[in-house]
Amino acid sequence: MRTSQYLISTVKETPSDAEVVSHQLMLRAGMVRKVASGLYNWLPLGLRTLRKVERIVREEMDKSGAMEVLMPAIQPAELWEESGRWEMYGPELLRVKDRHNREFCVGPTHEEVITDLIRREIKSYKQLPANFYQIQTKFRDEIRPRFGIMRSREFIMKDAYSFHVGKESLQQTYDVMHQTYSNIFNRLGLDFRPVLADTGSIGGASSHEFHVLADSGEDDIAFSNVSDYAANVELAEALSPAGELPAATTEMTTVDTPNAKTIDELVKQFDLSIEKTVKTLIVVASDECEADFVALLVRGDHELNEIKAEKLAQVAEPLQFAEESQIRELIGAGPGSLGPVGLNIPVVVDRTVAKTSDFSAGANTDGQHYFGINWGRDVALPEVADIRNVVEGDPSPCGEGTIEIKRGIEVGHIFQLGQKYSQALDAKVLDQNGKAVVMDMGCYGIGVTRVVASAIEQNHDEGGIIWPESIAPFHIALIPLQYDKSNDVRQLTDQLYADLQQAGYDVIMDDRDKKTSPGVKFADMDLMGIPHRVVISPRGIEAGTLEYKGRRDDEKQDVQIEDLMSVLAERINL
RNA sequence: CGGAGUGUAGCGCAGCUUGGUAGCGCAUCUGGUUUGGGACCAGAGGGUCGUAGGUUCGAAUCCUAUCACUCCGACCA
């Protein structure tokens, strides 16, 4: 492209409503423009990168044996009613009516449509396994879109769905997709990790999320400092501390604590060790629990893991904390003064709490705590479960090393669905015995637009974006100086421009008018993240050289004109 | 939905307290001088001050309502 014929929409100042770097830089470099909350225009520059990401995803999916299809963005309500999700999905599902008043939704995902398609098309086990994917626009009416393209309402997703007879076949395709995703993110030049993920209410064998590591990520990932273990903190198991419950060393005493409503205040005012405090959280009980509420106990410095808590049989799903008024009515004390001793509702304690002696907790009377509580002696040990988030320094669940926590951006998710949708939609094939069996399914997603943002999060400096080669909108920026004045410069530049394109490179040549100073051109190309830059100047031509600089290089270097091709070939892996 | 904040030219902002003809920088356009890291000079265009009411001789400024957007929490690729 010649810049004189291309839309360069760079801006010097950072738009005030952009919070994260990727959003700021995408706006500054002129990749996207906002249309409304969570809705964006992709400008020519941004679209080039987006298309390159799509191409890599498509190539690797094809290589894996998956077949590309295209499903409609608008889906009929009937299918969603069949799967039960018309009721379940909630307000994130954008529902629309057509002129006949028939109900539809704008697809946030496509399990229903693909399952409906496949149950009509595939009749025999001989046609399985089969994996279908599409790269397509999704819509989720997020409560709060944010971070620009990272969490927008409309976005592009690669979604794939595989069909099987039997779990073994599903596991095989799942493994293939795991490898395919690794290949994709490697080619995209991202620093990523597959991490164990929560399988949610569906259950099933396993699920992995693929996270790009970045401080701006919205997820916490737990790593072992010695093994390959990585899991979303939502899922990572908090092991029971080693050893037996230490013996009691103090008597239980009642202490007046009128000004200690939080653990922090309690610890400060009474000089306690926070590891010897316990907090009591009251949540709504499930139908199968005999009581209306359940108490959950975690150590003062730990956090309740709501997903783990939700999985307890006694706890209502979704997790719901009791209101203060309900707590008062139930226990006769406020949330700041609760504890296990003398509590009249079912209690579940975290594993760490179960191994703690001489601890402090509320006395279930306003303004009073018990210090020196011991299990068995002062109150019977109730049910024990893993209900907290792991923290740095915990032993790794894999048995090796300790936990480290880093932030990640979820760019992919692979999941064994089992028969959740095939069952609901009655998607069956005939097996070897001529018997109709329900198919097993897997699903595999990549947030294509999100990949673009996360690549920037991982690759930028003060000057702007630094694209990984594979998704750079252009590989090479050709910057001629005095293009309009010097015939030599113009001829050589035009020649190089043609030759480089001939050699297969995407080249942007900055022939903007003489009013555009060299500094502006350098700054724009840096901001747009073009990985390689070649400057053509009258001075250089006289000496028979060009100037080359990689986007990450500190220094520019002179290159003999005739060597340029080989220098670039060495650095650019097409 | 709860909490916090912001709406003034394409972008970044000032003006509002104390009402009196809407301003600055960048960007854009014209002419000229420049040309190795966001040049300089001269000139020009561009804003119903988010919207609707109200108070007032007079409202960007005070009052009321409303809308939009951003940030913090629950959802997810």
Image (cartoon, coloured by chain):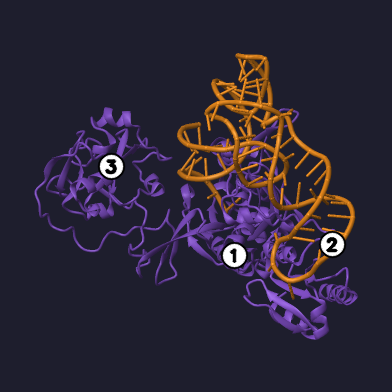
Q: Give the image quarter of residue A526.
A: bottom right
Q: Tell me the tag on residue A461.
A: 1
Q: Nearer the viewer, mark 1 or mark 2?
A: 2
Q: Nearer the viewer, residue A272 or A144?
A: A272
Q: Nearer the viewer, residue A451 or A121?
A: A451
Instruction: Please give the name of the residue rendered at 37% of the width and 37% of the height, measured from the top-left corner.
Output: A321
Q: Nearer the viewer, mark 3 or mark 1?
A: 1
Chain letter, disc 1 residue: A
Q: Give the image quarter of residue A502.
A: bottom right
SS label for mark 2:
loop
Q: Are marks 1 and 2 in contact (CB under 8 Å)?
A: no
Picture colour for chain A: purple
Between the residue at mark 3 and the residue at mark 1, the CA separation in whole angstroms equals: 42 Å
Are the residues under marks 3 and 1 on the same chain? yes
Are the residues under marks 2 and 3 on the same chain? yes
Closer to the N terminus: mark 2 or mark 3?
Answer: 3
Amino acid carrying mark 3 in the image: Thr
Q: Residues within 10 Å of mark 2 (few under 14, many from 20)?
A: few
Query: In the rendered image, which quarter contains the N terminus of chain A?
Result: bottom right
| Residue beneath disc 2 | A513
Instruction: Please give the name of the residue rendered at 58% of the width and 44% of the height, measured from the top-left corner.
Output: A145
Image location (x, y in percent) of residue A343: 21, 37
| Rendered position, A108 above or below A329 | below
Q: Tell me the tag on residue A262.
A: 3
Supply the letter of whichever chain is orange: B
Q: Tell me the tag on residue A148.
A: none
Chain letter, disc 3 residue: A
